[in-house]
Amino acid sequence: MKSLESFILGNVEVSILDEEGEDRAPFVKKEIVKTELCPDRTHLRIYFNRHQFFAVPLSAEVAISDDIWSAYDKQAGLTYVVKKGSGLSG
């Protein structure tokens, strides 16, 4: 959760990529409002509002740079990507 602190309350773009790096969905501009563990403590929830969130497995391999946070879920073959963006539109 600490690794995402610099992304909270800032403009970001989020997406989920498959193993080949193909977009499962296009990058969407959002604002992260908070992060917290799910009730069974197996996933990190990244909230965009009170109801919408990514649930990233805690077993995912996290990579961090100044502008990009990503977590690779080997079991599902998915990479959750949060990158700093400009402006909100969705």
Image: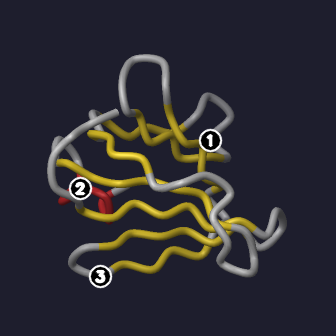
Using the image, tell me which numbered label, if any, was put on residue 7. 2
Quadrant for the C terminus in the image: top left
Q: Which residue is mark 3?
A: 65
Residue found at the very far top of the displayed protein: 50
Residue at image x 63%, y 72%? 72
Q: Secondary structure at mark 3?
A: loop
Query: Which label belongs to residue 53?
Result: none
Where is residue 38? Give x, y as percent: 58, 34
Q: CA distance from mark 3 to mark 1?
A: 25 Å
Q: Quadrant of residue 80?
A: bottom right
In this rendering, position of residue 78 left or right of residue 76: left
Q: Earlier in the sequence, mark 3 or mark 1?
A: 1
Q: Residue at x 22, y 59 (%)?
A: 85
Q: Is residue 20 above or below residue 56?
A: below
Q: Nearer the viewer, residue 42 or 76?
A: 76
Q: Which residue is mark 1?
A: 41
- Relative placement, left or right, of 66 versus 37 is left
Q: Are marks 3 and 2 in contact (CB under 8 Å)?
A: no
The residue under the point 74% across, 81% down is 20
Position of residue 11 measured from the top left corner of the image (x, y, whole percent): 20, 48
Callout 1 amino acid: Arg
Displayed quadrant of residue 17: bottom right
- In terms of sequence position, does the residue under pointer 2 or pointer 1 come before the other? 2
For the residues labelled 3 and 1, say whether their Cβ atoms are less than 8 Å apart.
no
Residue 86 is left or right of residue 80, and the answer is left
Instruction: Work out how far the residue at label 2 is from the one at label 1, CA to CA, in angstroms.
Output: 22 Å
